[in-house]
Amino acid sequence: MVDYLYTSAFFYCPMDPKIFKAYDIRGTYPDTINEEIAEKVGRAFVTYLGTKEVAVGRDMRVSGPALWQAVVKGITEQGCNVVDIGMVGTDQYYHACATLKLPGMMVTASHNPAQYNGFKMVREMPFLLSGSDGIPEVRDLAMKGEFPKAEIVGTIRKVDLADSFTEKVLSMVDVSSIKPLKVVIDTGNGMVGPAIQRLMENIPQVTVIPMYFDPDGTFPNHGGDPLKEENRRELQARVVSEGADLGFAFDGDGDRFFCIDDKGRFIPGDFMTALLSEEMLLQYPNSPIVYDCRASWCVKDLVTAAGGKPLMNKVGHAFIKARLREENACFGGEITGHYYFKDFHGADSGMVPALKVLQMISRRGQKMSELLTALEAKYFISGEINFTVSDQKAAVAAIKSTFTGENSYEMDGYSVEYGDWHMNVRSSNTEPLLRLNLEALSQEMMEAKRDEVIALIRQFE
């Protein structure tokens, strides 16, 4: 038994507990996330898991190298060995953890602006530490700053799994079935550029028009979140001007995928979940499909029609991944562009759905715009609308008392369903926002109900 602790005056800098989020650790550099905190987090992670080896990667953020060095220092000085997987995207990181059969730490802040950074922590693929499992324990250890002193310092070795990752993603589709297509790909100076360039070299029948493939943590061209219209506007215009069949976009760390049709229109994540579900059910007939409770009715309708079993679930990767494994589902999707695959270590990936879309378009012999138009003619969605309110609980309570509905539930936030419309209102797990998603069976009904709910929420702004 260890009867003494490692402590130092270095380890008494205040740490903001708010950096410990529902899915990861995240804050702004260098005020709430810095080298000192990174070292503490590394020590706490190793102490909590009791592991002897950890895979550690980082994305392209400017603060990444310094934070990587600090977290590695914390890990190794706790006597744990480090496998340096280099500068990678998050789905490459997941592949590394699964392939090496190791827990992992990734220095990343996903799609957040350049001043942010943080850590995604894998316990054992496909499970990450979360706000309900592991992150509170790491938080408490890091904030206390007292750790068992290791007898030896851990080692560092480098591993390059770029080729292994490419092979894994290619194995998820029948490359020979993909027809000649032209695709504009915008990686937004994030982590996907080099990886998708290697990937597409194996699919020469697809002409790629690259946008911002060079990783650059300053995000010199646009932000890293394609859900924001201003970050995908140029891609949408480029698809039209180039006469391309498709446009692909990825967030900063590459675990989310977004698609633009041949007319330059953005495809909402619930529509994409429904289309990808149909594709996956060809490979896995009658399989369960997991989708989040914000999604359009089109998901359950198309999954059911294709012979699958639609399973509504709480929002968030920790919950989706657990349900995927519990139900032996082949696929899961969230409206925010996260797509989960049983065959990709039970995890989410940005590049796997991109190839699935190429295969789907080739197989169906239809333009993406034709598929989107068919959905838009039946399902009228508001898209996610965000609000900064003074009292989120009061706002949700007011909505609950006003809209009781034929079917209401609190799977995640508050959801209510009527015969011709439904909505979900929930607090964000990553930002101080209240989020509304609403759908109706006509454009007029959607707009009327949307405006009614918005007016109620704005009373609390």
Image (tube, rainbow, N blue to C red):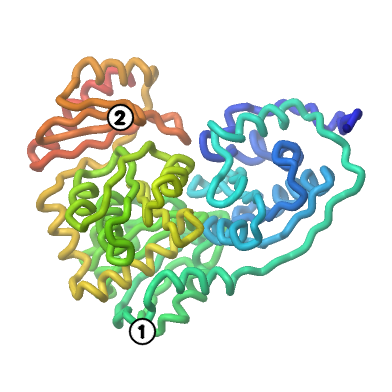
Residue drawn at (22%, 47%) of the image: 300
- Along the line of sight, the residue nearer the viewer: 350 or 29: 350
Residue 79 seen by the camera: yes
Residue 205 shows which numbered tag?
1
- The residue labelled by disc 2 is 425
The answer for how far apart the CA atoms under marks 2 and 1 are is: 44 Å
Residue 231 seen by the camera: no
Is the residue 362 above or below the residue 135 in the image?
Answer: below
* Badge 2: residue crowd in 10 Å (few <14, some 14–19, many ≥20): many
- Along the line of sight, the residue nearer the viewer: 113 or 425: 425
Residue drawn at (56%, 44%) of the image: 128
In x, y percent, where is residue 84?
71, 60
Is the residue 232 above or below the residue 4 in the image?
Answer: below
Toward which corner of the image does residue 240 lie, by quadrant? bottom left
In x, y percent, where is residue 301?
18, 49
Regarding mark 2 in the picture, which secondary structure is present there? Answer: strand
Residue drawn at (59%, 46%) of the image: 120
- Along the line of sight, the residue nearer the viewer: 396 or 326: 326
- Along the line of sight, the residue nearer the viewer: 356 or 252: 356
